[in-house]
Image (spheres, grey):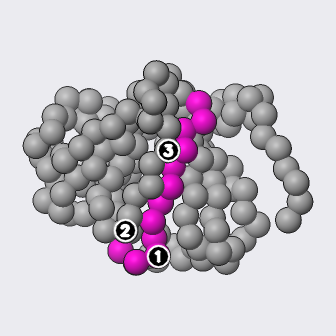
Amino acid sequence: MKVSFLTQDDFEDLTQEAFASIRLRTHLLLHESPDDVVQRIIIGLVKGTYIPPHFHELQHQWEHFHVLHGEVELMLFDNNGCLNKKVILGGQSKNVIVQIPPLIPHTLVCRSPTAVVMEIKEGPFDEKFAKVIPSWSYSEDYSIVSRDTITSMMAQLSIGDRFII
């Protein structure tokens, strides 16, 4: 491992890559291998990206998010898709870091035009156990429901509402 630095210009480059991405987000991996015991990822987000509500089923799969630029909203759901909690991270909020234990359905929603978030999680990374998208959530294929429909619905969700279109 070598000493490395990220600048505000790197954040700008990352968000520009996110604008060009079909998913409206992009990842910069800071770890060297999926086998590393600590996975470190910088995520560039553009408002309108959709990260499906999901959870991590293995006991070591906690996630740590640190908002470095912009504002995101963390949404926590119960196992039936009811919204339990919404927390703004970054921006004018005093909340900038969250750690989420395994088995808690969650998502991040980009509320500012762009955002940059650092994700830290325990490795190694195994694609087949990366995340579980519950049956009440929508994947990112948009064959049934468009991203705009999903993100519009999410913008209207209140505590106690079910994630459903």
Marks 3 and 2, the one that precedes in the sequence:
3
Does 139 lie within the magenta span? Answer: no
Q: Quadrant of residue 125?
A: bottom right
Label 1: few (<14), some (14–19) or many (≥20) C-alpha neighbours in 10 Å: few
In screen coordinates, is 31 left or right of 61? right
Quarter of the image with the C terminus in it? top left
SS of the residue at dot 2? loop
Q: Is residue 18 visible?
A: no
User: Which residue lies under the disc numbered 1?
Assistant: 60
Cα separation, mark 1 vs mark 2, equals 7 Å
Mark 3 or mark 1: which is in front? 3
Are the residues at dot 1 and dot 2 in contact (C-beta closer than 8 Å)?
Answer: yes
SS of the residue at dot 1? loop
Compared with residue 142, is residue 79 higher up or lower down, i.e. above or below?
A: below
Q: Residue at x 54, y 76 (%)?
A: 126
- Image position, residue 68 (x, y; %): 60, 36
- Image position, residue 163 (x, y; %): 17, 46
Return the mark for residue 154: none
User: Which residue lies under the disc numbered 3?
Assistant: 97
Identity of the amino acid at label 1? His
Identity of the amino acid at label 2? Pro
In screen coordinates, is 155 left or right of 120? left
Range of magenta residues: 57-69
In screen coordinates, is 14 left or right of 98? right
User: Which residue lies under the disc numbered 2?
Assistant: 102
